[in-house]
Image: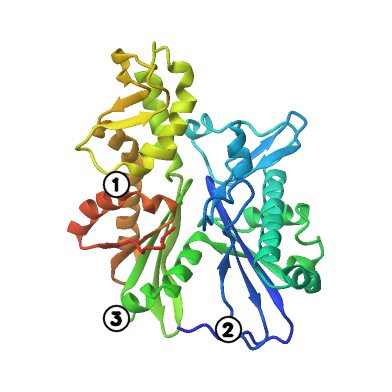
Amino acid sequence: MPRPPYRETRRKLVIAFDVGTTFSGVSYSILDPGQVPEIKGVTRFPAQKHVSGSSKIPTIIYYDKQGASRAIGAEAAKDGILKRQQMRGGLKLNDRIMANIPPLPHGKTVTQIFADYLRYLFECTCTYIKDTHNNGATLLATLGQRIDYVLSHPNGWEGPQQQQMREAAVLAGLISGTPESQSRISFVTEGEASLHFAINNGFASTNMNNGEGVLIVDAGGGTIDVSAYARQSNLYVEIAAPQCYLSGSVFITLEAKKFLSNFLSGSKFMDDLDHILRCFETTTKHTFGGTEEAQFIKFGSFRDNEEEFNIRYGQLRLTGQQVASFFEPSITCIVDSVKEQHNSARQKISHVLLVGGFASSDYLYNRLQALLEPSGFRIVRPENHV
């Protein structure tokens, strides 16, 4: 379905923020009267300029003892002393999850932290537009209040959580507290955003014209959002209640932490556990492809050896089965949720669209194929799924 031209008479800017548990991104569109809107992504951020075309930055803020933000995003990651804030207020967390989330900085609420991060993303977006568009600075200066914002959030979030996000937008200076200004904020669930992605990439129209539904699994850093849609005339409607689960890729690292805390008990490298986990998260977790081969976490130099704990030349050796066990709780969650959505949907579903940052894991994709295709599901992972 082609995108229609913008029908209003004055130029407008729309900015969409996707603030995730581990990584975040920004898209925007400059709406010119009579022109078909084009959606662009912000692909340059401070301290990340060397990464060509990178559209995501870490969801990290480093605060000092007085509660002032000192570094955000890739700048905070560069400093090596991070406070990873899980901005998922409103979700019920069990004790295991709560035990692994650092306390909030002194004197800061989740809403204030969210506001700090939104303000940073907005500033990055303005800088990017100034740097990449002809007369970008003039364009921004002439827009005034003609900037609308779209904020994504997990499936299942409703009024109370949206109000917190709206308050954060006010604190960030994006809008004021007046009803007219607050009307410039819109919300979209992860499921709805994934559906638009599917439509724009031609998947939905190809596989839904025959009356079937499609099940979308948005596998992110913190959450797994599962939604089911079908096409009715020119509309796409939910055919099952959307679900959100705290089983994203960050929980792979939590499982690794639980295992390594026991495995390295008594090792002289136990104090390096956090560094080992960061190395696992940035390398081994992403490259893991199966259980057949041993896996190595490179964390030290060739002088670091302790064969009793499978450490040689600065590398910790794990079996493929051990690493696979870190993935299993999340994989089981996805498989169970897909079957539950399928059973409760009002129309037939045979296609599962796998998107999100966690979807880039080949091991996750291959395991879902092995577990779900015998039940009649076809797992599809678009090339630009992240």
| Res 72 visible | yes
Label 1 – label 3 distance at C-alpha: 31 Å
Quadrant of the rendered structure where residue 293 is? Answer: top left
Residue kind at label 1, given as amino acid type: Tyr
- What type is the residue that disc 3 sits on? Asn
Q: Which mark is residue 172?
A: none
Disc 3 packing (10 Å; few <14; some 14–19; many ≥20): few
Residue 210, numbered circle: 3
Lateral position of residue 349 relative to residue 146, left or right:
left
Mark before the other along the chain sequence, 3 or 2: 2
* Quadrant where the image shows the C terminus: bottom left
Rendering coords of residue 256 (x, y %): 38, 31
Q: Label 2 is placed on what type of residue?
A: Val
Residue at horizontal 25 percent and vertical 49 percent from the top: 367
Tell me the CA gap for discs 1 and 2: 39 Å
Q: Which residue is mark 2?
A: 36
> In the figure, is residue 328 to the left or right of 176?
left
Which of these two is toward me, 180 or 378? 378
Residue drawn at (60%, 56%) of the image: 44
Q: Is residue 107 above or below residue 339?
A: above
Report helix, strand or loop for mark 2. Answer: loop
Residue 301 at what x, y percent from top left?
Answer: 41, 22
Q: Which mark is residue 363?
A: 1
Locate the N terminus by quadrant: bottom left
Query: Which marked residue is nearer to the observer: mark 1 or mark 3?
Result: 1
Q: Position of residue 49 (x, y in %)?
A: 59, 51
Q: Nearer the viewer, mark 3 or mark 2?
A: 2
In primary-sequence order, the first of circles 1 and 3 is 3
- Residue 83 visible? The answer is no
Residue nearer the viewer, 250 or 216: 250
Residue at disc 3, secondary structure: loop
Mark 2 residue crowding within 10 angstroms, few (<14) / some (14–19) / many (20+): some
